[in-house]
Every structure is written in C-alpha cells, then in structure tokens.
Amino acid sequence: MHKKRKRSNLILGFLILLLALILVYRTTSYFKQVVVETTTAELKKGPGIEYKTITHLKEKSRLTIIRTKYHWSYVKTSSNQFGWVADWMINPQKANKIQSLSNATIVLDPGHGGNDSGALSSGGKMEKKYTLIVAKKVASELRDRGAKVYLTRQKDVYATLKSRSDLSNTVHADAFISFHFDSSPQENGASGFTTYYYHRRLSNGLAKKVNNQLDNLPLSNRGIDFGDFYVLRNNKFPAVLLEMGYINSERDFEQIKSPSYQKKVAADVVSGLEKYFEK
C-alpha cells in the first residue's frame, strides 16, 4: 500500500512538472513575438492611456504577446517585465483587428458644457444638460457589453473642441460619437434628428449603421448628412455627430427631457454600434 502511494505521488509530481514545462514553453515559444517599431512605446499597468506607466520601451525591443484586449496587448519584455502596450506604440501600421463591440474603444462626446450652454428650449432649458444625460446612458450600456469607453466630459464643465477630438485621436477610438440637440431659427420651426459625418470614406459606414437603428424613435429621422464640425473634421478615426431632436420645438423637447426617450436613444445607438462592428 505504501509503495502504491509513493508511486502515485511520483506520477503526480511528474505530471505537475510536465505541465509547468509546457506552460514555460508556451510562454516562450507559442505566443507571438514582436519588435517595437516606434520610439514612443510605454509599458502600462492596464489596457488604457489612463493607467500608470511602468517603463518606456526602446525601439527594437522584443516583446512576447500573451493576450490582447481592445487596442492593447499584455506582454512580457526581454527583461521579464509584464504589462500592457498599445498596438500603435508597437507598430502603427498593424493595429489589432476589432470585430466586436466588447473589444472596441469608444469615445462619447456630450456637446457643450460649463459656460457653453448650447441651444436653449423655450423654457430656458440648456442643451448641455441633456447631451450629458444621454452620453452617460450610452456609456453605461456600452460598458455593460464590455467596451472601453471614454467621455470627453463627465460633468458640467467646459471642454474645448480640440480636446474632444484629441482624446479620440490619442486613444485611437474605433468610434467617436458626439451628442447634440438642434435648434431652429424660430421656435417650433423644425423637428426630428440628424446624423452627421465629415470624412466620408472613414465615417459614412458608422453613420449609416447608427442612423438605421434610430428609425423606431418617436421623432422623424432626417437621415444622414455631411457636417463641417470641428470634432468630426479633426478626427482621424470614425466619427459622427448626432442631433437628437430640436430643443426649441415643443414636440421634440417633450421627448428630449423624457427618460424613456433618452433610454431608447441609448439602446439604439448601442445597437447601431453592434451592427457596425459585426462587419
């Protein structure tokens, strides 16, 4: 009995050693090996620009990619340091292919804020309040689906137009969506919502997918149009601007201020993004 137990222990020990050797082999041989092709690479504690930098990586440094998430890879350096590095920091020409919303990086831009009230309703309600409400609802739904989400502002503060598009360019956003509410020269002079893009080749596909999912809203869909807006024009990544109703239209404002309308907008925008990444 004692001999059988000793033999079992030896077999178990051998199997554990074999498993450890396999894991070491996979770490050093199975995983993808890459070389840093830029002078700006940083090893981060997490998959995002907001995480602390562990160290700077020299050009031509060799890395072993263990796994990827969003546009970031968890790597082991030649000096046995572990951390996250962005794909554009390794090689700007070889970005991680994003094929699902759960792996996408999204920048949401609540229009206006702070001393910039935006358009006003007939009762003096400010556009900036409702753009932030809707953007936060969209952010919550996106995060529930695993997406990485950045907001250009998270409270009633002023953010420059440049800082908004700069954030998108910095994080290499897979989609940028700016939220607004329109205003006509005369009260009750117009109604409905519109989806705008600037760079046709870059953003028209995103505009179509999002706009198509908005058809079931209680306001009329005015379709897709070209919009010469700074946050779109200076964006290097797919970007759209949504005017989700006329704030100085009594009919539209009844919807704009309604939590149920805000919830529908959020759900439809997320659905549009899901369709967009299915491509």
Image (cartoon, helix red, strand yellow):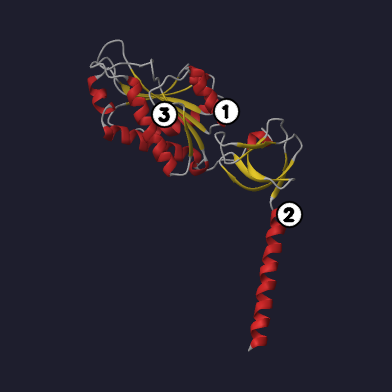
What is the C-alpha distance between the residues marked 1 and 2? Answer: 32 Å
Of labels 1 and 3, the one closer to you: 3
User: Are discs 1 and 3 less than 8 Å apart at CB?
Assistant: no
Amino acid at pointer 1 = Thr
Mark 1, Cα crowd under 10 Å, few <14 / some 14-19 / many 20+, is few
Q: Which residue is mark 1?
A: 170
Residue 12 % position (x, y): 65, 74
Amino acid at pointer 2 = Ser
Q: Is residue 125 above or below residue 45?
A: above
Find numbered disc 2 in the image and state the secondary structure of the residue it sits on: helix
Amino acid at pointer 3 = Gln
Find numbered disc 3 in the image and state the secondary structure of the residue it sits on: loop
Residue 29: image tag: 2
Q: Is residue 124 above or below residue 254?
A: above
The mark that comes first in sequence, 2 or 3, is 2
- Tell me what residue is drawn at x 45 percent, y 40 percent: 274
